[in-house]
């Protein structure tokens, strides 16, 4: 497929040199740099932190916290048991985004083809620039040093003939490592690696591979692609190619990235859950406000609303409903979400709600036109727009729903800071904010 | 860590498009800034907020500057003994 930017996209070829940059323990490293009293100590970055609360998960753990078994995703109550002396700090996404923008700025000194893969990962196509520095490794060293000097942060760099190999190479030597795997070293360089370390192998695939007695990438390389295709379909072929270090995905500069597929916010409500449904509904309203505000800000309408709920110690369930017409009106989407909760109230009261999430998908651009309504939705839309204008001028806290007054600030609708967190890891976020 | 969230007086340098706090006065006591560990700009609606993490005598102080109100505030203090 071609588009007007196609000449700028780095297309796969046998002669490409791709660099992958991964910031080491990014959020925790920024906090240890800024709050230097935490340097050399176990530090955990969380969404919100209160010494007497155990809600939520660890977003990032410093390298000092990792020997205790704490990593991103560890529940806070568990982290407290694993390392009682750990220090906690509330994540500050505006600060992290500021640093990411600086890193992207530095990366432009090394290549004009930069893909912002997530808040702490970049791909650079250095095929045409590495000779200016002598070699790809020399370029990587200069890049590493410049980030260290200007931002006081360290990173790990992988270099390879494609994105997959570059990303895998970066994992070889962490933290503060530079690894170069040339096309000539493949596929032998991957052969001794554990199969579970291969990109694309998740929890389930790991179990499948183990059941087949496949422990290393080398074993996977020796299986025929036909067999893998028969067993796992397209995924089998992808897996076989990955084991050989074959990846044809193009590097797409950030301004050409794909648009979002959905907008979603979620909130963990603690392992024991919340049994008071009025509180749960308020949380849901706050999340819905955040989702709708982002949609309006990015000029999208959604047709399908999905509600996901976790009942403490029992189960997770997900329900979706498609609306007659795509919308970005908060009250309409909130009402749909409440309808999706119907029938689960009794279970929720008995067991408590441990997680609630809403997402709006099946998107279309608002500029493509919206269905006019003769039953008053125009007015609702005007109210949302007026609220957006106030927030745009005076900030997210300037105006909130009366029912959320005095309620936990965390649930009073999303700010850009929360947007960043929710979207971490997705290029759509990077295109929007970096 | 504690969060005073109190107004402070700051001696700062505006130079080459950059704002650098050098000294501040909190509760009548002066603090010499030894190092600015980190700084970033954020927004509250249309209005920018400049945040600094500064080091003084081994302790860390987070201070913010709101240009639309021309006020400085001390938001957080991290003491070295923790």
Image (cartoon, coloured by chain):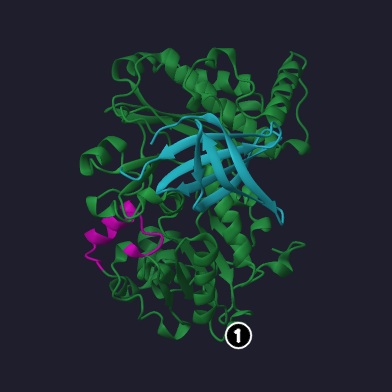
Chain colours: A green, B cyan
The answer to whether residue A382 is magenta is no
Does residue A281 appear to the left or right of A38 in the view shown? right
Decide if residue A94 is in sight here: no
Q: Nearer the viewer, residue B42 or A359?
A: B42
Q: Nearer the viewer, residue A135 or B52?
A: B52
At label 1, counting other C-alpha atoms closer than 10 Å, the crowd grade (few under 14, some 14-19, many 20 or more) is few
> In the rendered view, would you say A43 is above or below A346?
below
**Magenta range:** A197-215
Q: Which residue is mark 1?
A: A131
Q: Residue at x 58, y 13 (%)?
A: A402
> In the rendered view, would you say B73 is above or below B21?
above
Does residue A399 appear to the left or right of A340 in the view shown? right
Looking at the rendering, which quadrant does residue A412 occupy? top right
Q: Measured from the top left, where is residue A244 in percent x and y?
A: 41, 75
Does residue A154 appear to the left or right of A98 in the view shown? left
What is the quadrant of the N terminus of chain A in the image? bottom right
Q: Nearer the viewer, residue A324 or A32?
A: A32
Q: Nearer the viewer, residue A15 or A63?
A: A63
> In the rendered view, would you say A329 is above or below A432?
above
């Amino acid at each position: 497929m071609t588009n007007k930017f196609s000449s700028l996209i780095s297309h796969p070829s046998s002669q490409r040199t791709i660099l992958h940059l991964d910031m080491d323990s990014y959020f925790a490293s920024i906090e240890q740099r800024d709050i230097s009293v935490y340097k050399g100590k176990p530090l955990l970055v969380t969404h919100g932190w209160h010494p007497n609360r155990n809600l939520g998960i660890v977003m990032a753990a410093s390298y000092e916290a990792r020997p205790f078994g704490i990593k991103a995703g560890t529940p806070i109550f568990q982290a407290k048991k694993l390392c009682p002396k750990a220090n906690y700090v509330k994540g500050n996404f505006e600060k992290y985004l500021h640093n990411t923008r600086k890193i992207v700025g530095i990366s432009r000194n090394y290549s004009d083809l930069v893909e912002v893969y997530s808040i702490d990962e970049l791909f650079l196509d250095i095929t045409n620039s590495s000779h200016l520095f002598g070699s790809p490794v020399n370029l990587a060293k200069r890049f590493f040093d410049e980030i260290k000097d200007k931002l006081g942060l360290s990173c790990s760099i992988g270099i390879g003939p494609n994105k997959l190999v570059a990303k895998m190479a970066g994992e070889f030597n962490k933290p503060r490592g530079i690894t170069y795997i040339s096309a000539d070293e493949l596929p032998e360089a991957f052969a001794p690696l554990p199969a579970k370390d291969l990109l694309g192998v998740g929890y389930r695939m790991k179990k499948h591979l183990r059941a087949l007695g496949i422990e290393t990438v080398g074993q996977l390389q020796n299986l025929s692609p036909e067999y893998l295709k028969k067993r796992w379909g397209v995924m089998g072929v992808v897996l076989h190619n990955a084991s050989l270090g074959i990846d044809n995905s193009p590097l797409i500069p950030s301004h050409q990235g794909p648009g979002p597929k959905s907008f979603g916010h979620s909130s963990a409500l603690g392992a024991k859950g919340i049994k008071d449904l009025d509180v749960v509904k308020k949380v849901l309203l706050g999340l819905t406000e955040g989702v709708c505000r982002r949609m309006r800000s990015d000029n999208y309408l959604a047709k399908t609303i999905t509600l996901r709920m976790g009942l403490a110690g029992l189960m997770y369930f997900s329900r979706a409903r498609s609306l007659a017409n795509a919308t970005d009106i908060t009250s309409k989407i909130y009402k749909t979400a409440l309808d999706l909760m119907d029938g689960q109230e009794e279970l929720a009261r008995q067991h408590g709600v441990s997680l609630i999430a809403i997402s709006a998908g099946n998107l279309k651009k608002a500029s493509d036109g919206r269905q006019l309504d003769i039953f008053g939705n125009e007015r609702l839309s005007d109210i949302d727009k007026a609220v957006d204008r106030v927030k745009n001028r005076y900030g997210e806290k300037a105006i909130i729903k009366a029912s959320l007054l005095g309620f936990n600030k965390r649930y009073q609708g999303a700010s850009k800071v929360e947007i960043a967190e929710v979207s971490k890891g997705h290029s759509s976020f990077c295109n929007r904010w970096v | 860590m504690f969060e005073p969230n109190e107004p402070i007086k700051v001696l700062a340098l505006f130079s080459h498009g950059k704002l650098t706090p050098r000294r501040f006065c909190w509760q009548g006591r002066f603090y010499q800034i030894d190092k600015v560990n980190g700084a970033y700009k954020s927004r509250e609606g249309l209005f920018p907020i400049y945040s600094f993490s500064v080091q003084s005598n081994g302790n860390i102080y987070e201070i913010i500057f709101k240009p639309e109100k021309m006020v400085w505030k001390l938001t957080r203090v991290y003491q070295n003994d923790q």
